[in-house]
Image (cartoon, helix red, strand yellow):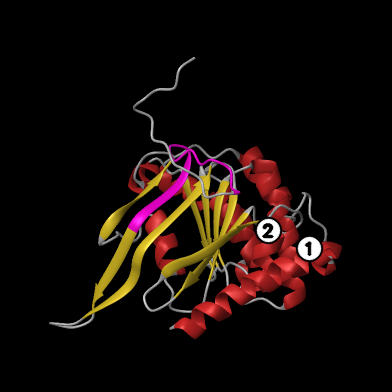
Amino acid sequence: MSRDESAPVATARPGTAPVDVAAGIEIAGVDKVFRTGAKTTFTALSDVTVRSRKGSFTTLIGPSGCGKSTLLRMCAALESPTSGSVRIDGVPPEQLRRRHKLGVAFQDSALLPWRTVTTNIELPLRVAGTRIDRAAVQDLVRLVGLEGFESARPAQLSGGMRQRVAIARALVLEPDVLLLDEPFGALDTMTRMQLNDELQRIWSERATTTLLVTHSLDEAVYLSDRVIVMGAGPGRVIGEREVGLERPRLAALRTAAEFVALEAELAAMLATAKGAR
């Protein structure tokens, strides 16, 4: 069968797999300029291009102020580029948001304090006017390891447990894309590592296209298929690395030579970018 000549085609960098830009996330030539005064502006992003395959796990890393969260907010249809384009599965993210096919979780779990675990997870269904499938909600409670806490309110939960609720809430509408902005950034190291394992397991079961923003090189290597490294002044892509480690990944992998080498390589890229500023 011949290829549809009208279908979008992307060329891969040497050593990487071809990317079908019609299925996945495509951020193409994006600039973002903020007005800071009557006659002054700030360029947050300059000519940023990021592509990820459908069903893959991609992570953005970089120093504070490099525009990682701004890019993620563009994918969530919460910001618009000044120039360039953002498309997910071949369409603007606004279309996926209107169809309730974008799941988003931020560093602040933003749970409603008067709602229980179950009713916080149900909230997107109510907002979307979708029938609440109690069995499906309970499946999500089990998926994020909160059985027995269905009636608990946020004040009765640990920080890690609140983030599990936030992730379940982001998944309840069965999104095509999961966007995560430092969801574990405020947690202690041990809890963070445990939730990395939970997120890996959830992603493996759902195979949802995922874009994560983090400052943690360990987290980026442990979770990702691909890591995009950004620099600041203005925000731009300075490099990328495929993570060819087999799944499922276990905690012991963090001390393996290949894991440590990948972390060191990413750290060197970040250090070089800072030195060039």
Q: Is residue 105 above or below residue 65?
A: above
Q: Position of residue 173 (x, y in %)?
A: 52, 43
The disc labelled 2 sits on which kind of residue? Answer: Leu
User: Could you say which quadrant of the image residue 96 lies in?
Assistant: top left
> What secondary structure is marked by label 2?
helix
Q: Position of residue 254 (x, y in %)?
A: 80, 67
Q: Residue at x 42, y 48 (%)?
A: 26
Q: Which mark identifies residue 27?
A: none
Query: 142 or 196: nearer the eye?
Result: 196
Tell me which secondary structure the magenta stretch mostly adopts. loop
Q: Position of residue 250 (x, y in %)?
A: 82, 58
Residue highlighted by disc 2: 223
Residue highlighted by disc 1: 258
Q: Position of residue 61 (x, y in %)?
A: 55, 69
Q: Is residue 116 visible?
A: no
Q: Is residue 160 left or right of residue 178?
A: right
Q: CA distance from mark 1 to mark 2?
A: 14 Å
Query: 151 or 11: nearer the eye?
Result: 11
Magenta segment range?
15-29
Q: Is residue 4 above or below residue 119?
A: above
Dot 1 alpha-carbon crowd within 10 angstroms: few under 14, some 14 to 19, many 20 or more: some
The disc labelled 1 sits on which kind of residue? Answer: Glu
Q: Residue at x 41, y 62 (%)?
A: 71
The answer to which of marks 1 and 2 sits earlier in the sequence is 2
Q: Are marks 1 and 2 in contact (CB under 8 Å)?
A: no
User: Could you say which quadrant of the image residue 128 lies in?
Assistant: top left
